[in-house]
Amino acid sequence: MKVEGVRELPADRQRVWGLLMDPAVLTRCIPGCERLEPMGENSYKAVLKIGIAAIRGSYNGTVTMSDLNAPKSYKLTVEGKGTPGFVRGVASITLTQEGGSTDFRYSADVQVGGLIASVGQRMLQGMATTLLHQFFESLNREVRSSAST
């Protein structure tokens, strides 16, 4: 499944980059994320609880940031396994300064398998859209709260 888009964030690129590199911020922003534990440089062990339709479950996996070109771009790799199946994804993320705001561009390829794949492409696409919306709403709150501190 391919997922891509652009979101505008009300902060300069350097501040957005700093938030994206902070595991505490990511834990608060990633839907269903219970914790991110450092495993090495820019690599984290992740525990998530996510539900798609009637299929709910916990996933253990890794989140790795690579090809870092601060504060412009990086590659994000996510792998997780759980009772409902597995999720693997690779995303390219680019931050572009636009006046006082930042355009966050993402393009990702995601694969799912096991029981979770049985919900169908349309349902998975809808859930991906919902999870992205929740992530960006949370990131927007983080951007606004970091501006006031």
Image: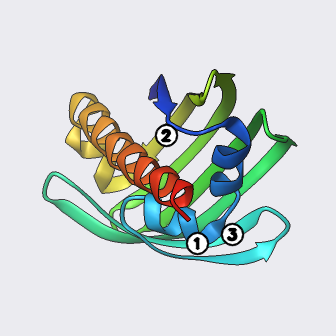
- Label 3 neighbourhood size at 10 Å, few (<14), some (14-19), many (20+)? some
Q: Residues within 10 Å of mark 1 (few under 14, many from 20)?
A: few
What residue would you read off at disc 1? 24
Q: What label does residue 66 carry, if any?
A: none
Q: How many marks?
A: 3
Pointer 2 local density, CA inside 10 Å: few below 14, some 14–19, many at least 20: some
- Residue 26 in the figure: left or right of residue 40: left
**In the structure shown, which secondary structural element does the residue marked by tag 2 occupy?**
strand
Q: Residue at x 68, y 24 (%)?
A: 96
Give the residue drawn at x 84%, y 41%.
70
Which residue reaches farthest front?
Answer: 148
| Residue depicted at x 67% and y 30% | 95
| Quadrant containing the C terminus in the rendered view | bottom right
Q: Given the image, on which type of amino acid does mark 3 rest?
A: Tyr
In the depicted structure, whether residue 34 falls above or below residue 65: below
Rendering coords of residue 82 (x, y %): 42, 69
Q: How is the image coloured?
A: rainbow
- Closer to the camera in the image, 53 or 37: 37
C-alpha separation, residue under disc 1 versus residue under disc 3: 11 Å
- Per the image, the residue denoted by label 3 is 44
Q: Amino acid at mark 2?
A: Gln
Mark 1 secondary-structure assignment: helix
User: Mark 3 or mark 2, which is nearer to you?
Assistant: 3
Which marked residue is nearer to the observer: mark 2 or mark 1? 1
When the figure is inspected, residue 93 is found, relative to residue 116, above or below; the finding is: above
Tag 2 residue: 111
Q: CA distance from mark 2 to mark 1?
A: 26 Å
Q: CA distance from mark 3 to mark 2?
A: 20 Å
Image location (x, y in percent) of residue 71:
79, 39
| Residue 52 as seen in the image, left or right of residue 36 | left
Q: Residue at x 24, y 34 (%)?
A: 126
Give the mark nearer the N terminus: 3 vs 2: 3
